[in-house]
Image (cartoon, rainbow, N blue to C red):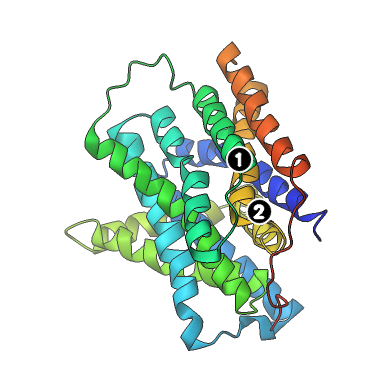
C-alpha cells in the first residue's frame, strides 16, 4: 500500500481535473453552480448507496458518536468549500479564486502538524512552495488586471480551508476504523442535505428554488444520453476520486497527499488545451512543470511513512 498509495492520490487528482468537461456541458444547459453541486452530490449518494447495498451493507453502519467526522467532511468541507469557491469567483476572478483555493496544501500541512504530529520537513516546505507557484502560473493570475478586495481574498481563503478540511476529518474517520466507501457515502449524503437546504433558503419564496432544483434534476435524466452523462459525471468526478484519495490517506501523510492532488489544475489546463483549444502560455507550461516537480519531490526525496491507522473496515 505504501508504494501504491501516492499513485491512488495522484489518480484522484487527475480525475478531479476532468470536472470542467462536465461543468461546461451543464452550463450550456442552463444549470447554475450550486445546482451542479447538488446534482453531483445527489448522484454520488445514490450510486454509492446502491453499490454498498450490493457490495457490503455493513459498511452503511456508523456510530452516532462518530457523526461529527462526517459532518466535518460533508458540511465543513464539501459544502463550505463549494460555497466559498463559487462566491470567490464572483468577487474576484476564476484565476484568483483558483490560486486562493490552492492554499489548501499549506493549511493541511499546518493542521496535520498540530493535530496529527506530522513532521514538517524542508522537503515538504519546498514542495509546497513549488506547488503553489506552479498553480499561480497555471491559472494565469500573474499579469492579469483583476482588482482584489479584502472580502474576495477572505472568501477565497475560506475555499482553501474547506478544501483542506476533507483530509483532516477523513483522517479522523479512518483512525476510527471506517472504510473509505463509508466515508465517501456519508460525506455526500450530508453534503446533499446541506446543499438542498441552501438552495431552498437562498430565496424568499422556498417554492421557487425547489422548482429550479427539480428542473435541474429533470434536465439530467430527461433522456438516455443525459442520464448516462450524469452518471458518468458522478462516477468520474466524485465517486472514484474521493474513494481513491481516502484510501491513499491510509498510507500517505495529509500534507503530501494534498500536494500530490494538486495535479488537478494541471490536468484541467491540459484538457482545456486539447478539448477546447484554449491557449497554453509559457507561464502555464512552467507552472505544469513545477507542479509535476513537486509531486516527484514528495515521492522520491522522502520515503513514504505509513500512517498508523486501524484497519479501514468495520
What percent of the width, then of the height, locates residue 238? 60, 55
- Can you tell which mark lies on residue 107? none
Residue 216 visible in the shown view: no
Q: Secondary structure at mark 2?
A: helix
- Residue lying at 59% horizontally and 70% vertically, measured from the top left: 183
Q: Which quadrant: the C terminus?
A: bottom right
- Residue lying at 39% horizontally and 16% vertically, measured from the top left: 144
The residue lying toward the viewer, choosing from 93 and 225, is: 93
Q: Are marks 2 and 1 in contact (CB under 8 Å)?
A: no
Q: Where is mark 1, residue-wise?
A: 122
What percent of the width, then of the height, locates residue 278? 57, 18
Q: Quadrant of residue 271?
A: top right
Residue 34 vertical position relative to residue 293 in the rendered view, above or below: below
Q: CA distance from mark 2 to mark 1?
A: 29 Å
What percent of the width, then of the height, locates residue 185? 58, 70
Q: Where is mark 2, residue-wise?
A: 241
- Residue lying at 30% horizontally and 37% vertically, measured from the top left: 153
> Which callout, 2 or 1, points at the residue further toward the start of the chain?
1
Residue 102 visible in the shown view: yes
Q: Is residue 163 left or right of residue 251?
A: left
What percent of the width, then of the height, locates residue 17? 61, 39
Label 1 Cα crowd, 10 Å radius (few <14 / some 14-19 / many 20+): few
The residue lying toward the viewer, choosing from 145 and 37, is: 145
Label 2 Cα crowd, 10 Å radius (few <14 / some 14-19 / many 20+): many
Q: Is residue 23 left or right of residue 257?
A: left
- Residue lying at 35% horizontally and 48% vertically, measured from the top left: 158
Q: Quadrant of residue 276?
A: top right
Amino acid at each position: 500500500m505504501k508504494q501504491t498509495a501516492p499513485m491512488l492520490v495522484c489518480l484522484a487528482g487527475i480525475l478531479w481535473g476532468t470536472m470542467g468537461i462536465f461543468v461546461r456541458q451543464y452550463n450550456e444547459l442552463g444549470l447554475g453552480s450550486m445546482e451542479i453541486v447538488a446534482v453531483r452530490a445527489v448522484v454520488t449518494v445514490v450510486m454509492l448507496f446502491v453499490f454498498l447495498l450490493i457490495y457490503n451493507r455493513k459498511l452503511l453502519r456508523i456510530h452516532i458518536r462518530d457523526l461529527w467526522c462526517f459532518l466535518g467532511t460533508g458540511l465543513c468541507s464539501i459544502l463550505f468549500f463549494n460555497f466559498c469557491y463559487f462566491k470567490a469567483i464572483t468577487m474576484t476572478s476564476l484565476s484568483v479564486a483558483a490560486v486562493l483555493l490552492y492554499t489548501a496544501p499549506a493549511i493541511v500541512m499546518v493542521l496535520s502538524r498540530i493535530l496529527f504530529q506530522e513532521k514538517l520537513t524542508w522537503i515538504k516546505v519546498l514542495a509546497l512552495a513549488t506547488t503553489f507557484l506552479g498553480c499561480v502560473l497555471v491559472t494565469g493570475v500573474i499579469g492579469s488586471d483583476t482588482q482584489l478586495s479584502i472580502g474576495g481574498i477572505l472568501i477565497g481563503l475560506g475555499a482553501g480551508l474547506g478544501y483542506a478540511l476533507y483530509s483532516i476529518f477523513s483522517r479522523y474517520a479512518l483512525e476510527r476504523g471506517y472504510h473509505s466507501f463509508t466515508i465517501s457515502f456519508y460525506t455526500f449524503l450530508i453534503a446533499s442535505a446541506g446543499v438542498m437546504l441552501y438552495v431552498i433558503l437562498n430565496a424568499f419564496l422556498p417554492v421557487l428554488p425547489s422548482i429550479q432544483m427539480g428542473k435541474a434534476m429533470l434536465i439530467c435524466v430527461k433522456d438516455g444520453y443525459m442520464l448516462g452523462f450524469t452518471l458518468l459525471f458522478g462516477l468520474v468526478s466524485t465517486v472514484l476520486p474521493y474513494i481513491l484519495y481516502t484510501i491513499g490517506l491510509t498510507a500517505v501523510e495529509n500534507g503530501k497527499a494534498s500536494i500530490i492532488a494538486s495535479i488537478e489544475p494541471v490536468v484541467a489546463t491540459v484538457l482545456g488545451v486539447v478539448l477546447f483549444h484554449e491557449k497554453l502560455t509559457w507561464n502555464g507550461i512552467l507552472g505544469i512543470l513545477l507542479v509535476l516537480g513537486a509531486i516527484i519531490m514528495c515521492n522520491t526525496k522522502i520515503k513514504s511513512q505509513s500512517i498508523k491507522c486501524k484497519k479501514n473496515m468495520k
